[in-house]
């Protein structure tokens, strides 16, 4: 996966989080934005999420206030 593509996807995700929290009138924007880079990198370049494998990689977040970032 190309770094520029991950960077562009993270930028797009940040915009989405800002719009989502603005329209909802609430949210934990800081927590959501702080995890975008790692989530994009994991999902686009590190994790094997192929549905054919029963033992596919899984990501279990523990920061509940960052749900908007997912």
Image (cartoon, rainbow, N blue to C red):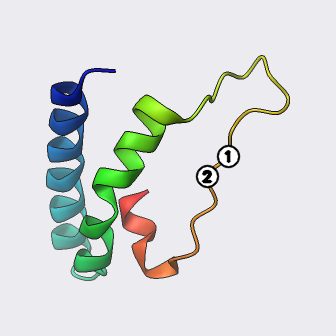
Which quadrant would residue 26 be assigned to in this image?
bottom left
- Relative to 45, residue 50 above or below: above
Q: Secondary structure at mark 1?
A: loop
Q: Name the residue rendered at 56%, 35% in the picture.
A: 47
Report the residue that reaches farthest toward the top: 52
Identify whether 24 is placed above or below 45: below
Q: Quadrant of residue 25?
A: bottom left
Question: Distance between the Cα atoms at labels 2 and 1?
Answer: 4 Å
Q: Would you say 34 lies left or right of 67 here?
A: left
Where is residue 56, by image quadrant? Answer: top right
For image coordinates 67% across by 46% down, the residue present is 58
User: In screen coordinates, is 51 left or right of 19?
Assistant: right
The furthest residue to the right: 54
The percent coordinates of residue 14 (x first, y second) are 19, 55
Dot 1, how many residues are within 10 Å of its Cα: few (below 14), some (14-19), or many (20+)? few
Please report the residue visible at 64 percent of the width from the left and 60 percent of the height from the top. Answer: 60
Residue of label 1: 58
Q: Quadrant of the N terminus?
A: top left
Q: Secondary structure at mark 2?
A: loop
Q: Nearer the viewer, residue 21 or 28?
A: 28
What residue is shown at x 24% (from left), y 60% (from top)?
17
Q: Is residue 55 left or right of residue 65?
A: right
**Whether residue 55 is situated above or below residue 14 in the rendered picture:** above
Q: Which residue is mark 2?
A: 59
Front position in the image: 48 or 52: 48
Image spot of residue 69 (x, y percent): 36, 61
Q: Residues within 10 Å of mark 2 (few under 14, many from 20)?
A: few
Q: Are marks 2 and 1 in contact (CB under 8 Å)?
A: yes
């Amino acid at each position: 996966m190309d770094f520029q593509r991950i960077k562009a996807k993270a930028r797009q995700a940040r915009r989405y989080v800002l719009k989502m929290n603005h329209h909802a009138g609430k949210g934990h924007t800081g927590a959501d934005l702080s995890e975008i880079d790692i989530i994009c990198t994991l999902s686009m370049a590190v994790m094997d999420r192929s549905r054919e494998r029963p033992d596919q990689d899984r990501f279990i977040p523990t920061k509940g206030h960052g749900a908007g970032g997912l």
